[in-house]
Image: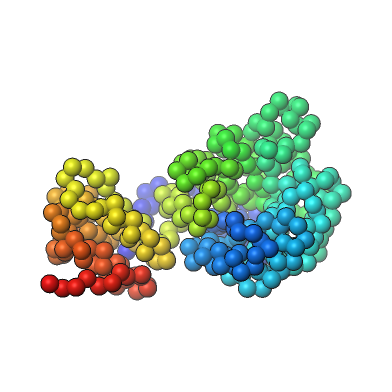
Amino acid sequence: MSQKNDAIQIKRKSTRAIHIGPVQVGGGAPVVVQSMTNTDTRDVAATLAQIQRLAAAGCEVARLAIPDQKAAAAFGEIKKESPLPLIADIHFNHRLALAALEQGADAIRINPGNLGGEKKTRQVLEACRERGVSLRLGVNAGSLEADLLEKYGAPTAPALAASALRWVRKFEDWGFFDFKISLKSSDVLVTVAAYREISRLTDYPLHLGVTEAGGLIAGTVKSALGIGLLLAEGIGDTMRVSLTRDPVEEIRVAYEILRALHLRERGVELISCPTCGRCQIDLFGLAEEAERRLLAVTSPIKVAIMGCVVNGPGEAREADVGIAGGARVGILFKKGRKIRQVPEKEMLFTLLSEVAALTGEAVELPEAPEKQ
């Protein structure tokens, strides 16, 4: 298997530990990967199916929107069958938080700025305390308190941090400490600055994310920059990559960010060249199909798919296994060492079979090509 490069190690900030069901957040635990379902929570079957797909992709905690009492009731049915701890996402109506807690929520996400004031917020905290359930204190640039907007003139980083700190102090005054904090903006630099400030001022675990990040490309770039910058500074205990896509894609991006920083290694790291005029195989198709079929592999293995038989093995020397293409043929190599030549039509099957043998995990293989 690939060896982790320990030349540079990130020193993570020490934070308090909380739990979302059995999953620890903060307190030195690995950065926890979350996502949020985009199905209608009232559709129990569809939501459960998506949660199961998220779990298979490596998601460790799932968050569900609770827009009404019917969704809160469905939450209870989903909780009974869910393979993951579940967070109830609440806005505007504190009674929905109370209902979700009755249905077995492992954690509650609220934004006090839109929950209806201190009295209602405190009722939610008291209910969480009674059940031993943690809470996420979420501050969002789109729902900042009016007095802070007036003071700072805009949802700036200091404004977001001030809002969070205001509620942190209230929670502490009420004797509630079992929470994490998030400060989200669609502006990457505002988000980073806000998290830096709150990290300096408190030791509560932090949930990282860039809100409304966008589609696959824009959202990946903004999340990788915002979340990545903070993680590289040792800030952050759990994260969600927000994409306007299938939430399974969020999990893939999250683990790639963590892998790039050597914070967590899960699944296949696929490296491939951008191609040039020397490429004589369908490298795009081969890489895309291999990536899709290797999603379920959890072993931290490096797989290379290169378009040039001349430089491929050398450029991917650290890969555990790979293919370097030539004129309708490819060279199978391991650790930069050539093993054998493979016809183009057999490349995918051969590569995936090698991964299955190396990891001992089930891999979705294509139909075996016919031998001439």
Q: Is residue 360 above or below residue 174?
A: below
Can I make out residue 135 in this image?
no
Q: Quadrant of residue 32?
A: bottom right
Image label count: 0
Q: Residue at x 74, y 66 (%)?
A: 73
Residue 358 picture quarter: bottom left
Which residue is painted at 72% across and 61% down in the image? 71
| 314 lies left or right of 209 | left
Return the residue found at the far right: 119
Could you say which is closer to the camera, residue 184 or residue 180? 184
Query: Is residue 69 or residue 112 the one in the foreground?
Result: 69
- Can you say whether 91 is above or below 352 in the image? above
* Residue 108, image x, y percentages: 71, 57
Is 279 left, or right, of 173 in this rendering?
left
- Which quarter of the rendered picture does the C terminus lie within? bottom left
Query: Quarter of the image holding residue 341?
Result: bottom left
Residue 251 horizontal/vertical position (percent): 50, 56
Residue 364 horizontal/vertical position (percent): 36, 70
Q: Is the N terminus in the top left, top right, bottom left or bottom right quadrant?
A: bottom left
- Which residue is at a point 77% across and 48% down the rendered structure image? 92
- Relative to residue 190, is residue 301 drawn left or right? left
Q: Is 90 left, or right, of 37 in this rendering?
A: right
Residue 7 at x, y percent in the picture? 37, 49
As drawn, 220 above or below 40 = above
Residue drawn 57% across the image and 56% down it: 35
Q: How is the image coloured?
A: rainbow
Does residue 240 appear in this view? yes
